[in-house]
Image (spheres, helix red, strand yellow):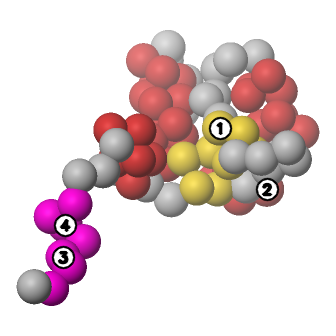
Amino acid sequence: MAFLFWETKMPTDTLRVHNRGRAHRYREVAQVLNCSERHVIRLVRGGQLRADRLGARVVRIFDDSIDEYLASIRSQGGV
């Protein structure tokens, strides 16, 4: 009997990460938002942009977080 990946049970957290899109570095998000890398860091620290710590020094911002931030800016009348 062959082992099929999609038949295995995966934890909900793992599925959530897979559905969040690509993970970006601060620099990449800054290019998307047309701002400085430092501004992106301020947005994350201020709670306006959600980021995930994947290690001691590794922080990534997923596509869904960028989409949520842009939607909140648009609803406030910006962008």
Give the amino acid at mark 3: Leu
How dense is the environment of label 3, judged by Cα within 10 Å: few (below 14), some, or many (20 and up)?
Answer: few
How far is mark 4 from mark 2, CA to CA?
Answer: 34 Å
Q: Nearer the viewer, residue 33 or 50?
A: 50
Crowdedness near tag 2: few (<14), some (14–19) or many (≥20) residues, C-alpha within 10 Å: some
Q: Secondary structure at mark 2?
A: helix
The image quarter in which residue 61 lies: top right
Q: Nearer the viewer, mark 3 or mark 1?
A: 3
Dividing the picture into quadrants, the one containing residue 2 is: bottom left
**Residues at marks 3 and 1, CA–CA distance in whole angstroms:** 30 Å
Q: Residues within 10 Å of mark 4 (few under 14, many from 20)?
A: few
Q: Earlier in the sequence, mark 1 or mark 2?
A: 2
Distance, label 3 to label 4, CA atoms, is 6 Å
Residue ID for mark 1: 52
Q: Earlier in the sequence, mark 4 or mark 2?
A: 4
Q: Earlier in the sequence, mark 3 or mark 1?
A: 3
Q: Quadrant of the N terminus?
A: bottom left
Seen in the image, is 21 located left or right of residue 15?
right
**In the figure, 10 relative to 53: above or below?**
below
Q: Residue 32, how many percent across, how many down?
A: 63, 54
Report the front residue among 66 and 53: 53
Residue 4 on the magenta span: yes
Q: Residue at x 83, y 27 (%)?
A: 42
- Tell me which label, 2 or 3, sits earlier in the chain: 3
Q: Which residue is mark 2?
A: 27
Left or right of 13, for residue 56: right
* Label annotation for residue 40: none
Amino acid type, mark 4:
Trp
Residue occupied by mark 3: 4
Region of the chain picked out in magenta, as a range: 2-8
Q: Amino acid at mark 1?
A: Asp
Q: What residue would you read off at disc 4?
A: 6
